[in-house]
Image: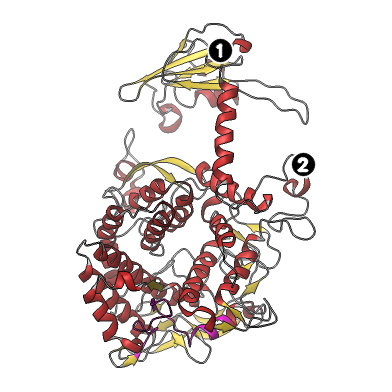
């Protein structure tokens, strides 16, 4: 980069006060123009070897020069010559309280005599286009407040797209200087193949500037509203050979690629495929086929790595739910002990059904995937059989007395004990739910035959799941882990304000555990306690302040609403549940999901007192005219007050609020 001549400083004529020219061997030549006086700073983009490693720099002007000049006052840090490989324009602004200032810049491929001449018109045009785009997302009667929530949620996802670069082999081996020897045996040493150099949708480009696999999946479900092609590219990115481990493992997150995030990529791919088809009329079977081919590797990894005793009950481990268990799921249990997880097994049942539906879609389109659909659905049936306790050892995750799914601990002697904890762990099996229409089924005769083989939900002599053969009035089939006899009992827990139902959604741990803390002696750990904590964790147990022992989390609430909507689509008005906390009379599942969605949206919407629950009462976001229309999308929320917790700028998966609002405004009265 080097400074370039300018043609005058008259902003009235659109001239520039300064200009810099940059040239790259592959990107070409670009020009940056500034409308306001600034000091132009140049240096080289090489590390300060003297400061970092105690060896002489190859040349005097290194990449920390701007900090040393501006912060530390070191005048000789920058290159006196107006050229270098790193550039900054240093503006000094003096403003009184309440004043504002603008700095105008233009980046152009061609040299321009008056680069700012059309700046105002361009800004106004882009603003009008954005207004029109967001206005079209919701019907005209939608309140301005919910429009603002949708717009800021979606724009937050755009803001949180960033270039992410991590070449693991180079990081392990070192490039300029040898790294510490401990790095060779530290984190990610088994991921030498991973070479990330991509724009990725991250949870928060400020506080969490890295990807997490299940965050990417959730974010794609919302990004699809904005740009289906970007959403599809994000889903495929972590399945590329540069990311996906040769053994089929999807990298979890930067500090431990080897952890397991919930297997959500299939659900996200299916969701994006369906949204795009519904909105545009175009079914991108090529995308679905590419994703399914790669996910078969990840599917096999889960089956072979996370079911060590081949019970079809899974031990996913941490799974991003931090301290939700009384066992530290991020670490191995004592030798011989195994934790069979209701959430891991539920995720796998969901994964199997997602894969089934993807294969059915492709087979119905004539792409030869019917045998894959048969195989994946057969695996779903095996998981359902195991959850029901019919795999030969009597181990059931479903507690028929308490109407809830629960974890099991297995001992070296082969004994087992169910963990009497009520948390998201026992709700996630509901996510294994799909609807199959008659027209699609008519094109996959071998798969249709498989459904009829298991009429009544029977498998190997036992009833294990919803009946796949029955149809509703529209001729649709329900493929689900839970059936209509199990749903009412689970919903009694979920819709009870003394248990799961918070004013702001479903709690991550039942409020029962505010009193029912003592779980007694548990195999492998002895005396165990679990306590309901609606806000930040009081201890650094199993994940610091990331708390799944009470607060409301958007992503799991979203998937629960999606699952209950599918159950309603199949069961219709015939299934009603008593929910005194929501209404004085029995409600359909459609009405239930509407109430849950309204409570979640209520976190970011002004209440009867004119306050937004997510923010402290004295926050400028509440009433200050300069801030009251700005929104922050927190990581999770206090279950009793709605206060936003965790990362304060994590639009990430909380952007799913946009999906909920769009769904609420598309609903038909029932």
- In which image quadrant can residue 58 be found? top left
Compared to residue 498, the image places residue 400 above or below, namely below
Whether 391 is among the magenta residues is no
Task: State whether the magenta stretch is mostly helix, strand or loop.
Answer: loop
Q: Rate crowding at label 1 as few (under 14), some (14 to 19) or many (20 or more) other CA atoms within 10 Å.
A: many
Tell me residue 542's x, y (percent): 51, 66
- In which image quadrant can residue 49 be found? top left
Whether 480 is among the magenta residues is yes
Q: Are marks 2 and 1 in contact (CB under 8 Å)?
A: no
Residue at 37% from the left image edge and 41% from the top image edge: 198
Compared to residue 518, the image places residue 425 above or below, namely above
Tell me residue 80's x, y (percent): 49, 11
Q: Which numbered tag is attached to residue 149? A: none
Describe the colour scheme in one phrase: secondary structure
The quarter in which the N terminus is drawn is top left
In this view, the residue in front, 218 or 527, is 218
Tell me residue 39's x, y (percent): 57, 15
Q: Is residue 97 left or right of residue 67?
A: right
**For mark 2, what is the residue?**
625
Residue at 41% from the left image edge and 62% from the top image edge: 261
Q: Regarding mark 1 in the picture, which secondary structure is present there?
A: loop
Which portion, as a residue range, is magenta? 463-491
**For mark 1, what is the residue?**
16
Q: Regarding mark 2 in the picture, which secondary structure is present there?
A: loop
Q: Is tag 2's residue or tag 1's residue first in the polypeptide sequence?
A: 1
Tell me residue 258's x, y (percent): 35, 59
Compared to residue 195, the image places residue 52 above or below, namely above
Instruction: Give the Cα distance between marks 2 and 1.
Output: 34 Å
């Amino acid at each position: 980069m080097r400074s370039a001549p300018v043609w005058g400083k008259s902003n009235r004529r659109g001239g520039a006060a300064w200009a810099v020219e940059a040239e790259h061997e592959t990107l070409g030549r670009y020009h940056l123009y500034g409308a306001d006086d600034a000091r132009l700073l140049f240096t080289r983009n090489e590390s300060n070897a003297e400061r970092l490693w105690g060896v002489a720099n190859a040349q005097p002007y290194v990449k920390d020069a701007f900090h040393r000049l501006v912060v530390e006052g070191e005048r000789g840090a920058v290159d006196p010559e107006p050229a270098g490989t790193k550039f900054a324009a240093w503006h000094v602004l003096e403003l009184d309280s309440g004043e504002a200032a603008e700095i105008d810049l233009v980046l152009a491929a061609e040299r321009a005599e008056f680069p700012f001449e059309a700046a105002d018109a361009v800004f106004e045009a882009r603003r009008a286009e954005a207004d029109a785009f967001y206005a079209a997302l919701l019907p005209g009667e939608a309140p301005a407040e919910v429009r603002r929530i949708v717009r800021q949620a979606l724009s937050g996802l755009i803001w949180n797209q960033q270039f992410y670069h991590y070449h693991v082999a180079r990081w392990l081996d070192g490039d300029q200087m040898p790294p510490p020897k401990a790095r060779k045996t530290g984190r990610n040493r088994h991921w030498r193949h991973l070479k990330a150099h991509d724009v990725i949708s991250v949870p928060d480009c400020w506080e969490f500037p890295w990807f997490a696999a299940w965050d990417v999946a959730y974010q794609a479900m919302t990004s699809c509203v904005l740009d289906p092609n970007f959403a599809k590219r994000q889903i495929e990115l972590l399945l590329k050979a540069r990311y996906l481990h040769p053994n089929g493992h999807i990298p979890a997150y930067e500090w431990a690629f080897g952890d397991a995030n919930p297997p959500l990529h299939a659900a996200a791919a299916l969701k994006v495929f369906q949204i795009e088809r519904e909105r545009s009329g175009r079914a991108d079977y090529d995308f679905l086929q590419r994703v399914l081919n790669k996910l078969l590797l990840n599917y096999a990894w889960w089956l072979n790595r996370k079911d060590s005793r081949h019970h079809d009950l899974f031990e996913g481990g941490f799974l991003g739910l931090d301290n939700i268990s009384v066992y530290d799921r991020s670490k191995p249990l004592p030798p011989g002990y195994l934790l069979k997880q209701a959430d891991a097994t539920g995720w796998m049942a969901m994964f199997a059904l997602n894969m089934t539906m993807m294969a059915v879609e492709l087979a119905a389109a004539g792409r030869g995937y019917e045998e894959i659909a048969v195989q994946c659905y057969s695996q779903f049936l095996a998981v359902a059989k195991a959850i029901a306790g019919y795999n030969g050892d009597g181990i059931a995750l479903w507690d028929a007395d308490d109407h809830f799914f629960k974890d099991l601990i297995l001992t070296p002697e082969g004994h087992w004990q169910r963990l009497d904890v009520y948390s998201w762990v026992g709700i996630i099996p509901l996510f294994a739910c799909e609807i199959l229409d008659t027209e699609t089924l008519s094109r996959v005769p071998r798969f249709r035959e498989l459904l009829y083989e298991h009429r009544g939900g029977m498998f190997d002599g036992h009833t294990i799941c919803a009946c796949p053969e029955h149809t509703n009035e529209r001729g649709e089939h329900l493929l689900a882990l839970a059936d209509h006899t199990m749903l009412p009992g689970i919903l009694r827990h979920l819709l009870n304000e003394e248990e799961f139902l918070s004013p702001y959604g479903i709690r991550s741990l039942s409020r029962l555990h505010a009193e029912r803390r003592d779980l007694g002696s548990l195999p492998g750990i002895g005396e165990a306690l679990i306590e309901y904590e609606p806000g930040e964790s009081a201890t650094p147990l199993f994940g610091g302040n990331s708390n799944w022992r009470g607060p409301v989390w958007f992503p799991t609430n979203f998937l629960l609403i999606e699952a209950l909507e599918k159950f309603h689509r199949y069961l219709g008005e015939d299934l009603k549940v008593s929910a005194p906390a929501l209404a004085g009379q029995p409600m359909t599942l459609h009405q239930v999901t509407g109430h849950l969605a309204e409570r979640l949206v209520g976190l970011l919407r002004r209440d009867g007192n004119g306050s937004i629950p997510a923010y402290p009462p004295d926050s400028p976001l509440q009433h200050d005219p300069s801030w009251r229309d700005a929104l922050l999308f927190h990581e999770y929320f206090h279950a009793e007050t709605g206060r936003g917790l965790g990362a304060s700028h994590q639009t990430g998966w909380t952007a799913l609020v946009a999906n909920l609002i769009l769904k609420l405004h598309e609903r038909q009265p029932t």
